[in-house]
Image (cartoon, rainbow, N blue to C red):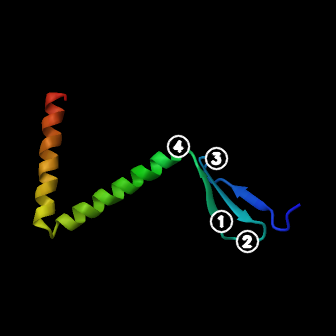
Amino acid sequence: MEEWPYIFESPDGGETIYRRRQGEKERKLYHVSPKALEKMNDLKETQLWHEIRQAAKTDETLQKAIDHVKILYYIKQNHGS
């Protein structure tokens, strides 16, 4: 038996699994399911777009690029492509 066996914990029913040594509080990510990974990536993407929108408030070039993306999006939505 190991002197410091690991304890495995999952706060979300197995979507993410952390491990830590017995008696320690610090834990490290051990496993992420594809579903949880997709959710994490979606959250990062949302945060990135938030930061871009905030930066565009003082950056005219960024704001113009966002406006172009919006126009393209609306065109594609209205033409079903």
CA separation in Å, label 4 and label 2: 28 Å
Image side of residue 20 versus residue 51, left or right: right
Image side of residue 46 versus residue 19, left or right: left
Contact flag, marks 2 and 1 (Cβ < 8 Å): yes
Residue ID at (85%, 68%): 3
- Badge 2 local density, few (<14 within 10 Å), some, or many (20+)? few
Image side of residue 67 versus residue 29, left or right: left
CA separation in Å, label 3 and label 2: 21 Å
Q: Which residue is mark 2?
A: 24
- Badge 3 local density, few (<14 within 10 Å), some, or many (20+)? few
Contact flag, marks 3 and 4 (Cβ < 8 Å): no
CA separation in Å, label 1 and label 3: 15 Å
Numbered tag placed on residue 54 in the rendering: none
Q: Which residue is mark 3?
A: 14
Q: Is residue 26 above or below residue 39?
A: below
- Badge 1 local density, few (<14 within 10 Å), some, or many (20+)? some
Q: Which residue is mark 4?
A: 34
Question: Which of pointers 3 and 2 lies earlier in the amino acid sequence?
Answer: 3
In the rendering, at what x and y percent does residue 71 appear? Answer: 12, 44
Q: Secondary structure at mark 3?
A: loop
- Residue 60: image quadrant is bottom left
Question: Which of pointers 3 and 4 lies earlier in the amino acid sequence?
Answer: 3
**Between 21 and 13, the one nearer to me in the picture:** 21
Residue ID at (42%, 51%): 41
Q: Nearer the viewer, mark 3 or mark 4?
A: 4
Q: Which residue is mark 1?
A: 27
